[in-house]
Amino acid sequence: MPSRREAPQVSRSTFLKGAAGALLGAGGLLAGMGSAVAAGTSASPRGAAAPSAGPVKDLTGEETAGFGFRGTDLGFTAKTNHGYCISIFGDTFDQPVPQNGTGWRSPVGLRQSNADIQNGIRWDNCIGGGAAKQMIPYDHRDANTARNEPGQVVTEIPNDLIHLPDGRYMMTTFGVRDWAIQSEGGIPSPGGSWRTWYSRQWTSTETHAENWERTWDLDNNRENMDFWNEGLWSHFQNNSMIMWPNEGFVYIYGTNEGRWNGGGIHLMRVPWDKMWQRSQYTFWGADDAGRWDFRPNGPSTPIIAAPSPFEAIGEISAQVIDGRVVLSFLNGARGAVTQTAPYPTGLWTAPRTHVTFAQAPYLYAPIVHPYSTLGSAQLLVSQWINPGPDSSFYGVRQWSSSVDGRVAVRGAMAERLVVTKDEPAHPGHQGPVSPQWQKLPVAEQIALLSDNRDDRVSREDIAAATHAVRARR
């Protein structure tokens, strides 16, 4: 085990530290900016008052001590065909924080079934019996080996899992090649963050997903079903999966390795009963004429872009909530956001802000729980506060929220946003599939994002984040 086990989060926390500092030190910047309503936006078209967003409870630490661990992060959650949920967590330790931690394993899984999640998620049991085990077979390699030997990894970090109609479970992880800690010889990706070798698929055919094995690629002599970090597959190193009602496809949303400055979210799909055939995957993108469609050889065009060339989209999660697709992710310096659509391809709403760095320093990986509703959602949000030897928290907290973030726009702002309708994006659609809010003048950006936020999110925080990013240019 590496002596500096804090490494896996350092590049994450470095990214978050600058954003959080800018937010905490830049209050009051909204004065005189006005609101998006004044600029021609009608927020919350349904007219219902959204519940205030706020922390509900810690989901790790003492909450998971009975399963043999206290420190972990992530918690990507999927509803099973049995009705209960499985949440998968990343680098996990016996102690509350990683430093000098024992029991390092990743991923681990917890099961949960209580429907009253607004009162707090309660874990029923774990994958592993009495104590949560590392769910998949592999070895953690030292940093130098993982960096230089293809396929050797420091750790496997979970992306998502899905329970297919035939009862088998599919899970994806990404294999960490390099956490990009330059003082320790790490080499950042071209996007400025950690590097991966691949995203790997795993399968469990057991009723309750107790044991897992690598997925075979039936198109290639039953070799591993890996998305190597190259070509079109490089856009799906981080990924999340859904099935749309009454369709036979698994839709997979993805981003490049780590957090890719200026990158975006991509989409591909595959028939659910052919996930183990690489030739059956098709990529959603716009051709030279601007027409969107699913094509076997691409292109793969971002459906949602990073807010600026100096920011990145963080860990993503996808759910189907009340008949809408809900994407949750870290949106650059602006914190935890969601964007929703009436169909897996779009059209996407503008970002709705749920938690800022001022509220939750060093936050990442916001995940909407599948038992949520649009008006009453519960998010799992990770934090590693003050990474290093004096770390005070490494875990997951539950936040209440509303993900009903549709925004209607008219006038000059609508012309610049381009996407203002709430309708499916079908093959043949031309133009963007999500609002181009990042191209608005700064005052209108702040106004739009401020009117599309949870009650406890401060307008001042949104203004501070926006100005902090512009100051880097």
Image: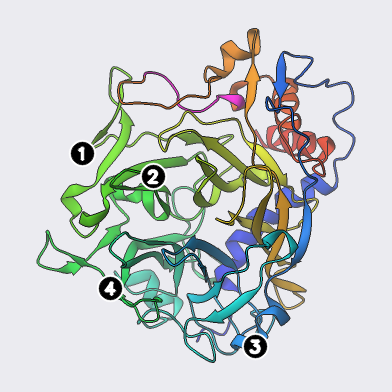
Distance of label 2 from label 1 (alpha carbons): 26 Å
Q: Are marks 4 and 3 in contact (CB under 8 Å)?
A: no
- Label 1: which residue? 297
Callout 1: SS: loop
Q: Are marks 1 and 3 in contact (CB under 8 Å)?
A: no
Amino acid bearing label 3: Gly
**Residue 5 visible in this rendered orientation of the protein:** no
Is residue 50 placed above or below 398 in the rendered structure? above
Distance of label 4 from label 3 (alpha carbons): 29 Å
Amino acid bearing label 2: Pro
What segment is highlighted magenta in the picture? 430-437
Distance of label 3 from label 2 (alpha carbons): 37 Å
Nearest-to-viewer mark from 3 and 2: 2
Distance of label 4 from label 2 (alpha carbons): 27 Å
User: Which of 273/34 is in front?
Assistant: 273
Q: Position of residue 443 (x, y in %)?
A: 75, 21
The numbered disc on residue 214 is 4
Is residue 181 placed above or below 368 in the rendered structure? below
The numbered disc on residue 245 is 2
Q: Earlier in the sequence, mark 2 or mark 1?
A: 2
